[in-house]
């Protein structure tokens, strides 16, 4: 009784996007990263592996943020120095990319100016030669100013700006950010909260000012125990719809798996029966990441070294 | 391999079901009429057995047709008996968003017969005591997988007897030697254990045992789905119906193969309706312990993430070795999550909850009826040891922030709830504490309710501090 199973064939494919640019391409990166390009649901058939291995970007913050001990332990030396932190992410933990979170720009925190934020990014660009992701503070007006400033400063670097939102559309700052990112040759990440209609709508708005060929999507990652299943199903639905031909969803996706740490179970002391807090937390981040890897996510924003090495290891083994 | 096309659950319309129901609209099922019941059935919210008339002799034929129409492409298999019976399989779809996944995979923990009896007792106790309360539900382990390591049938019988004296957990008997399985069955056949496994080598003798005892059996052909199908066909023809499939759980470098095998089998069953693939799948993440000698921590770690991958990708039953809480907790929580109904959040009943011994001067707080929200708030209030009333508002199971954004939690809704739950009879003041994330409703709420609104912290862990500092509120 022969078992025959052909790989599924889909009519469409996910856009392929290159992040970062080398000197020859107008930037200063040592190498570039390509994501997307999938033609099928990943890891369902040995003959249809994703065209590119999943990418891992490690976080750097420009401000002290409350963090569980398990995450802070190895960071004491670099916590106040984004450039050194970035360097450690790359050299010690093999980050494919680095995300610089410019939380200091938050009007409710330090309200640092776009110029100051831009300076931080410049330092990180000099410290490491991997492609960068630039994270804002979540304020639609301030992020637009910050991103615009940085887009011009880092002309040609093909940064990924994280993120543009429908809040920006409401605050009328979407157009200028998109145009700045386009003019200076960067990529954008559109962020929406677990809703494909909102994601499509935001994308349509972005297309008015920005080429779809450089747009990625963040559909929201919820922590295990706090609704990871919402994220899982949204990503499965998005990928299926995209491969079936919906052009508004044919963008590579990213997951902020560090959200795992918002679950109390990831860091709280639950007594001896659930002990080894030093392993439970990283396992929380790992499982969130692997689950969304199976659902098709292309790029992962991570923090814990053990989660990073496991995700990379598993992804590599799933590829063949 | 494509067989005659049966309708998938997604293609069955309420009419298809309605046509086979008694159509008397007697409402015994609790629905207004047969059509309403049929709609619930195709949505997986009701089962055909919920219609008493159709179970009577008069409708015998229709019932059979209904059962055939609604039969999941992955058969349901039971093992264990009575209250401890486990139900596995019964899957309809590949993707969770197509139809709620049915029957979460039980997790069996292994016991080997080379362990001392005392050690076995300790391990069983650990399995039985393992429990974590997650959003109000106890999460626990489900079964024992008894492995023959000594290869001694007498010892195996002894161990099974010992286990049966200690607990009622459903059992999986693990050995490919029919003599061992026979020895094990002599001590527990009436408990309907699952036999693991029939293989290419032992199928004749093991098949006899299965036919004699009527126990379900795992058909094992690691890495070879063609062989697996051949074995299933042979056993089917022999009259064996209760089967579970073991396509092999490979680890380390071969994790990809494992995911491909599980996916291929499930796809063959639910997309191609291949009846030889339409059985529950057994995952054995315990296999990592046979790998290269690594540290125990590393083995627990590998087993943990492999298990979660198999929960995601189609395992209907799992055998694990680790009973470390940190390794198991995420499995139990993920299993719970991925098996919830994707169309509606897990919620709790609306209403008033009291904490401690509140009186007429105690604080009144509101929250949403999303289970995660409610239990978080509940545990924070309990930890803060305050006396208060908490009014749980029906937000359609949405969290506070999502409910405010989606307009399921509005000033009007708050006013309605205060009325419904007679807040004015609970206390003699008119001060209402709302979640920080609902702050933008405060003005309107004051207008709609006539109560003064105090905006609480954004995270309920701050409730204790707020009450200590701001209660009773100063008059304006
Ligand atoms: C999972 C999720 C969903 C799930 C629903 C899950 C559910 N059952 O609620 C789904 C996908 C269905 C969903 C839908 C929507 N969502 Co939504 N969702 C989330 C997400 C990721 C997590 C929410 C959650 O579970 N929080 C955990 C619970 C426990 O929090 P909580 O209920 O607020 O309770 C806490 C506090 O409020 C406080 N608290 C609670 N009660 C009380 C009581 C008192 C007295 C006090 C003092 C404190 C207190 O303590 C609790 C513990 O910290 C958030 C983003 C995020 N990461 O927070 C977005 C988010 C809430 N969603 C958002 C939106 C906009 C929506 C939608 C309107 C649009 C959409 N995306 O489709 C819809 C609304 C529903 C609808 N259909 O119309 C926005 C809200 C933006 C805003 N502030 O206005 C968010 C913030 C995402 C974003 N940034 O865009 N969502
Ligand atoms: S119990 Fe059966 S016959 Fe009566 S209304 Fe319900 S579905 Fe119809």
Image (tube, coloured by chain):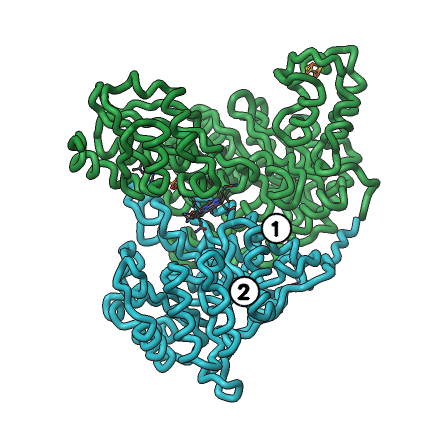
Q: Mark 2 or mark 1: which comes first in sequence?
A: 2
Residue beneath disc 1: A237
Secondary-structure class at tag 2:
strand
> Residue A216's mark?
2
Q: Which chain is cyan?
A: A
The C terminus of chain B appears in which quarter of the rendering? top left
Numbered disc total:
2
Which quarter is ligand 2 in?
A: top right
Would the CB of label 1 be found within 8 Å of ligand 1? no
Q: Find residue B77 and report its horizontal and vertical position in percent.
A: 64, 31
**Pick the front one: B412 or B109:** B412
User: Residue sitting at 40 percent across and 20 percent down?
Assistant: B420
Residue in view at x 33 percent, y 37 percent: B442
Percent from the top left, x then y, of residue A305? Answer: 37, 63
Q: Quadrant of residue B177?
A: top right
Q: Residue furthest front?
A: B447
| Label 1 crowd (10 A; few <14 / some 14-19 / many >=20) | some
Which residue is at 71% across, 19% downward? B34
Q: Which chain is green?
A: B
Q: Residues within 10 Å of mark 2 (few under 14, many from 20)?
A: many
Nearer the observer: mark 2 or 1; the answer is 2
Describe the element under mark 1 as helix, strand or loop: helix
Q: Quadrant of residue A17?
A: bottom right
Cα–Cα gap, marks 2 and 1 = 16 Å
The answer to whether residue B55 is left or right of residue A155 is right
Q: Is residue A55 above or below residue B96?
A: below
Q: Nearer the viewer, residue B231 or A10?
A: A10
């Amino acid at each position: 009784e022969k078992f025959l199973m052909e790989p599924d064939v889909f009519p469409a494919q996910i856009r392929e996007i290159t992040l970062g640019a080398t000197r020859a391409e107008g930037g200063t990166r040592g190498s570039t990263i390509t994501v997307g390009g999938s033609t099928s649901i990943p890891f369902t058939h040995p003959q249809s592996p994703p065209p590119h291995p999943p990418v891992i970007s490690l976080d750097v913050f420009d401000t002290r943020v409350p963090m569980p001990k398990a995450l802070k332990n190895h960071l004491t030396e670099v916590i106040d120095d984004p450039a050194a932190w970035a360097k450690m992410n790359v050299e010690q933990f093999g980050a494919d990319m680095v995300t610089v979170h410019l939380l200091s720009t938050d009007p409710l925190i330090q309200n640092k100016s776009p110029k100051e934020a831009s300076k931080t990014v410049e330092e990180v660009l000099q410290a490491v030669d991997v492609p960068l992701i630039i994270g804002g503070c979540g304020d639609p007006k301030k992020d637009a100013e910050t991103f615009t400033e940085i887009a011009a400063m880092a002309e040609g670097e093909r940064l990924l700006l994280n993120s543009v939102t429908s809040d920006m559309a409401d605050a009328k700052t979407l157009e200028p950010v998109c145009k700045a990112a386009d003019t200076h040759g960067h990529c954008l990440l559109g962020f929406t909260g677990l809703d494909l209609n909102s994601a499509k709508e935001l994308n349509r708005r972005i297309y008015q000012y920005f080429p779809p060929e450089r747009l990625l999507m963040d559909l929201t990652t919820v922590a295990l125990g706090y609704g990871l299943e919402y994220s899982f199903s949204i990503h499965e639905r998005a990928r299926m719809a995209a491969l079936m031909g919906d052009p508004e969803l044919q963008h590579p996706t990213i997951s902020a798996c560090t959200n795992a740490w918002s679950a109390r179970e990831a860091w709280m002391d639950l007594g001896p029966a659930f002990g080894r807090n030093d392993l439970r937390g990283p396992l929380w981040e790992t499982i969130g990441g692997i689950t969304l890897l199976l659902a098709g996510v292309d790029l992962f924003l991570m923090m814990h070294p053990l989660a990073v090495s496991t995700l990379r290891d598993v992804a590599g083994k799933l590829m063949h | 391999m494509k067989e005659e096309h049966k309708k998938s659950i997604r293609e069955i319309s309420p009419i298809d079901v309605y046509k086979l129901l008694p159509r008397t609209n007697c409402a015994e099922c609790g629905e207004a009429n047969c059509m309403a019941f049929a709609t619930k059935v195709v949505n997986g919210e009701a089962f055909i057995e919920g219609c008493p008339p159709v179970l009577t002799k008069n409708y015998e034929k229709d019932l059979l047709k209904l059962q055939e129409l609604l039969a999941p492409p992955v058969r349901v298999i039971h093992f264990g008996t009575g209250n401890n019976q486990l139900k596995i399989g019964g899957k309809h779809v590949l993707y969770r968003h197509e139809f709620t996944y049915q029957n979460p995979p039980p997790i069996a923990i292994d016991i080997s017969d080379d362990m001392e009896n005392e050690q076995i007792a300790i391990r069983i106790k650990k399995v039985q005591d393992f429990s974590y309360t997650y959003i109000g539900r106890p999460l626990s382990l489900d079964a024992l997988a008894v492995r023959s390591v000594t290869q001694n049938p007498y010892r195996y019988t002894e161990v099974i007897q010992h286990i049966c004296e200690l607990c009622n957990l459903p059992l999986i008997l693990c050995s490919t030697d029919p003599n061992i399985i026979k020895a094990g069955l002599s001590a527990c056949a009436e408990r309907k254990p699952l036999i693991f496994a029939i293989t290419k080598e032992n199928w004749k003798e093991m098949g006899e045992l299965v036919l004699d005892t009527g126990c379900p059996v795992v058909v094992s052909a690691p890495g070879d789905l063609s062989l697996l199908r051949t074995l299933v066909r042979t056993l089917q023809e022999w009259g064996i119906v209760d089967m579970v499939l073991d396509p092999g759980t490979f680890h380390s470098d071969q994790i990809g193969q494992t995911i491909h095998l599980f996916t291929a089998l499930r796809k063959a069953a639910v997309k191609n309706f291949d009846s030889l693939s339409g059985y529950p799948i057994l995952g054995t993440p315990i296999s990592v312990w046979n790998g290269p000698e690594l540290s125990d921590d590393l083995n627990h770690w590998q087993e943990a993430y492999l298990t979660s991958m198999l929960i995601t990708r189609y395992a209907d039953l799992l055998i694990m070795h680790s009973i470390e809480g940190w390794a198991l907790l995420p499995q139990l929580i993920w299993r719970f999550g991925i098996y919830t109904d994707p169309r509606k959040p897990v919620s709790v009943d609306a209403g008033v909850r009291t904490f401690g011994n509140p009186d007429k001067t105690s604080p009144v707080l509101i929250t949403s009826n999303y289970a995660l929200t409610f239990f978080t708030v509940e545990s924070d209030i309990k930890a803060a040891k305050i006396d208060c009333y908490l009014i749980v508002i029906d937000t359609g199971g949405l969290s506070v922030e999502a409910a405010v954004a989606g307009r399921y939690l509005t000033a009007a809704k708050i006013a309605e709830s205060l009325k419904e739950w007679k807040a004015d009879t609970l206390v003699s003041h008119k001060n209402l504490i709302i979640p920080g994330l609902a702050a933008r409703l405060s003005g309107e709420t004051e207008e709609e309710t006539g109560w003064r609104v105090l905006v609480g912290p954004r995270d309920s862990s701050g409730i204790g501090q707020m009450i200590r500092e701001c209660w009773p509120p100063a008059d304006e």
